[in-house]
Amino acid sequence: MNYKKLKTVLASTALVGSISTAAPAAAEGIMCEPGETYIMNVMVSGHPYWVPVYQGFKQAAEAFGCETVFSGTPDYDITKQIASFEQDLVKTPAGILLHPMQSDPFIEPINRAIGNGTEIVTFAADSPNSDRTAYITSDNLAEAKFAAEEIVKQVGDSAEYAVLENPGQSNHDLRVTALIAYMEENYPNMKLVGRQATNQDSNAAYRATASIIQANPNVAAIWIPEAGSAEGAVAAKLEANSDLLIMHADVTPTTLEHIKAGNIHMSLNPNQGVQGFMGFMAVHLANRADIFDPFNDWQTSGFNPVQIPFMDNGFAVITKDNADSFDLNVYMEGRDPA
């Protein structure tokens, strides 16, 4: 008999026994108490982007017996989003998964919420100077690099291009500034001929794109950090009968149809369900930090030991070939949207 192997097996069995004995207590500690609620707060709450995110958030919550609420404001207005956040805090939730429209205005509300016992995790956009315990998003730098390389692949390395942007929203800012910087460093013959703020307004994007096309008839490509503005851009392209190559981040049912039709070249879409699922896990674990004892200075520093400065939920590339996989109506069949 191999006694060394037997000794290892016996030791492993003992370890498994000790784990299984402790497991019920650990499992009980991470489950939600009756009525324990987590909220997801966003701006432009009617945007279809949030639907799969909230579904992932809710699926994770249900696994731990927790309740969820979808909240926010229908407006693209920082004052109104902060007001909705304050209203959420009145309900004393266990935690909030927050998409802050702008970074700095949310610093004080986030810090105050955490000080009063409500854990905060940000997603898709961040408030990095606040005390939020975690931030989950797709890698905006990777998205910008991918977009730049794809544009050059399609139109060459000595063409004119443009961007639309939404100043003040961290993820959108990074998607645009990183692409421009990457072009300048790697493709100096690429010429930026248009840069206009549209703030997720499809009508503003239509006017901006029409103006760019008219002023720059040789413009070959445009990069847009979100899908709402892409809806307006493609309308302007079709009206001008232009060959403008459109690439954007995120996706809506409207832009998906234009991808299928070939009017939009490609979309880079964050894995929204993963974003919501892991967003819940981060905020729930921050609220259950006492179930483990990490090897750091959390006891003396006073900080929550669950600190996740950046978690990458990845992104998918949507083209004609796989567009059917991103049909929101199909995804929501049989699912409760609330």
Image (cartoon, rainbow, N blue to C red):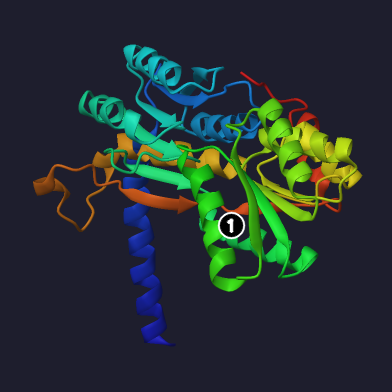
Q: Quadrant of the C terminus?
A: top right
Residue at point 37%, 76% (across, down): 8
Q: Nearer the viewer, residue 125 or 284?
A: 125
Residue 240 falls left or right of residue 148 = right
Circle 1 sits on which residue?
Answer: 144
Secondary structure under tag 1 reads: helix
Q: Nearer the viewer, residue 301 or 138?
A: 138
Residue at point 26%, 47% (across, down): 292
Q: Quadrant of the N terminus?
A: bottom left
In the image, residue 271 lies at what x, y percent? 62, 46
In the image, residue 46 lies at what x, y percent? 63, 21
Q: Nearer the viewer, residue 241 or 325?
A: 241
In the image, residue 333 lies at what x, y percent? 78, 27
Quadrant of residue 191 within the rendered picture: bottom right
Q: Residues within 10 Å of mark 1 (few under 14, many from 20)?
A: many
Residue at point 14%, 53% (across, down): 297
